[in-house]
Amino acid sequence: LASQSSSPTTVSINTLMEERDVTTSTTNTSTHIHPNINPNIKTNTALKVLFLSSDTGGGHRASAEALGSQFERLYPGSTYHLLDIVKQHSLPPYNNLESWYKHLSAHPTQWNLVYKISNSHTINSLINIHLKLTTEQSVRQSIQSYEADVVISVHPLMTNIPVTSCAKISAETGKHLPMFTVVTDLGSGHCTWFDNGVEKMFIASDQIRDLAMTRGNVPSNKLVRTGLPIRYDFSLEAQRLGDRTTMEGKIYQLQMKNRLNIINVSSNNNDHHHDHHRQDRKVLLVMGGGEGVGSLSEIVNCLYYTCTMQKHCQVMILVVCGRNEVLKSSLENRDWEQVMNQYQTNENRHQHQQQQQQKQQQHQKELSSSSSLKQQQKQMQNENNQQQQECHHHQLDEKDNENIATKVTGIVLNPIKAALQKSMSIASNNNSSDNTNTNTNTTVAQEKYESDLSSPSSSSSQPKQLNHVIVQPLGFIPNMAEYMVAADVLITKAGPGTIAEAASLGLPILLTSFLPGQEEGNVDFVEEKQFGIYKSDSNPMEIANTACE
């Protein structure tokens, strides 16, 4: 994503401005080749840039601000503004787009339904006709009020109407007002992105190129593959870090950990000077998007438990909570000893259940085996025959005893009977006592097992937070590039901006969730490029086991 010698954002800016400085028309079919321009070179042209965006997730605004900052850097005196034409000029339900986004993103099934229904040519055409009839004039007036030199859409619902408005403004004023689209999706994109009336469309991948050409009939000469816009500090850190797998890269990463106080931080104030393994402390960076959404709390618990059980690991778990103050406070005050006890108990119970299931399966397998069944039947037949023979001999013995007894005098017979009765009474009492003891022993053993099952072994008892595993909750991070340099693994949802930033720094990614349709292609992109894998947040323990591998 950042393979050019200058940053992707810089390439995009220079391409945009080259198109602006040259007289353009929608019929121009020449292939544009963007130059390799030094990002530190500045021009004397100050520009007014208008971005069309909405706060439906953090990616659109982040892309606009990354581009805007680069405009200011390369063209001193330039200014930029963000305009949400849907929120300001559309009718319901479009003007409630932000609240709808928050609701649907928290309910993936509903999101998937809305996305699939709206992602069709017929529905898209109806929406565009409706918006043109109801909002185009007010959108045109709003854009014209900014007196912009260039208009850039970074949102799929803000391409079709503004293209018409910019064309009318150019005709009315006699000054060409170019409009560009920067597609901020990575592996998949909604059909509303691809209006072929823009001057140029900047894309991040071959997947988006194919969608633009097939869904929007966008000619190939209008498509410019630049990667996603990322913040300038990521470009700087990428140059300083280089290849993180080399010795130079590892040294720079270690210096960054030291700068962020990751190496020396400790939960035990008395153990600052004698931990010789701090140099090897691994960093797991956990993110859930700008709102801190997702099952972050459960994922962090599983990470803490799994890392703690691997006692040879020195791990810091950095959790970016975003605006989620409840999560941040919960992590700051969490009793990690209780977390360990809970998960150890669950692990014991799970192991016991597995053992019982294995025994049942083995027993069923033996019963279902024909040879085993025949052997059991044969054995049962032999036992029955033996019992019948013993019973027959016993009856004969009793008849013989009776014949002998009748010939014995009463003086001899009565003491023998008395002795036999006494012996039988004692044996009966002993058998009853043995049964009672057996039941008692069984009850005690069962109670001991239940006690062991509900409490972890003594070896797994941990303090509130172990020195070799530390959880550090964070709010919003202005220096995210530095934290990604220091991290060894990024655990996050499949947002395209976050993926692009991590890729620019060579940071391996463990994806845990995605919005159906919109972000699903991002997962495929990451796995196909082999710089990350996907494990669903429906199984947090699997995420933890994968991260610790």
Image (tube, grey):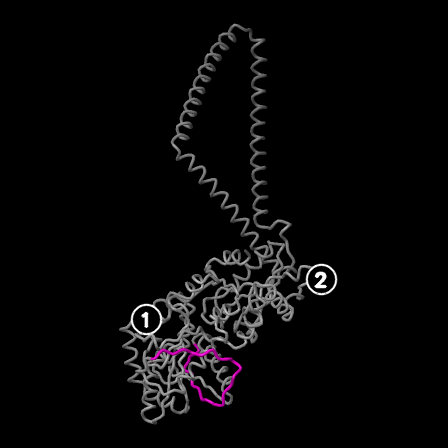
Residue position marked by numbered label 2 in the rendering: 271
Classify mark 2: residues with Cα within 10 Å, few (<14), some (14-19) or many (20+).
Answer: few
Classify 400 as above or below 155.
above
Task: Tell me: 353 left or right of 473.
Answer: left
Q: Position of residue 118 (x, y in %)?
A: 32, 72
Which residue is the extreme one toward the bottom?
173
Magenta extent: 30-55
- Position of the C terminus by quadrant: bottom right
Element on which disc 2 rests:
loop
Classify mark 1: residues with Cα within 10 Å, few (<14), some (14-19) or many (20+).
Answer: some
Classify 349 as above or below 189.
above
Of the residues under marks 1 and 2, which one precedes in the sequence?
A: 1
Dividing the picture into quarters, in which one does residue 144 lie? Answer: bottom left
Indicate which disc residue 119 carries. 1
Identify residue type, mark 1: Asn
Q: Position of residue 496 (x, y in %)?
A: 45, 70
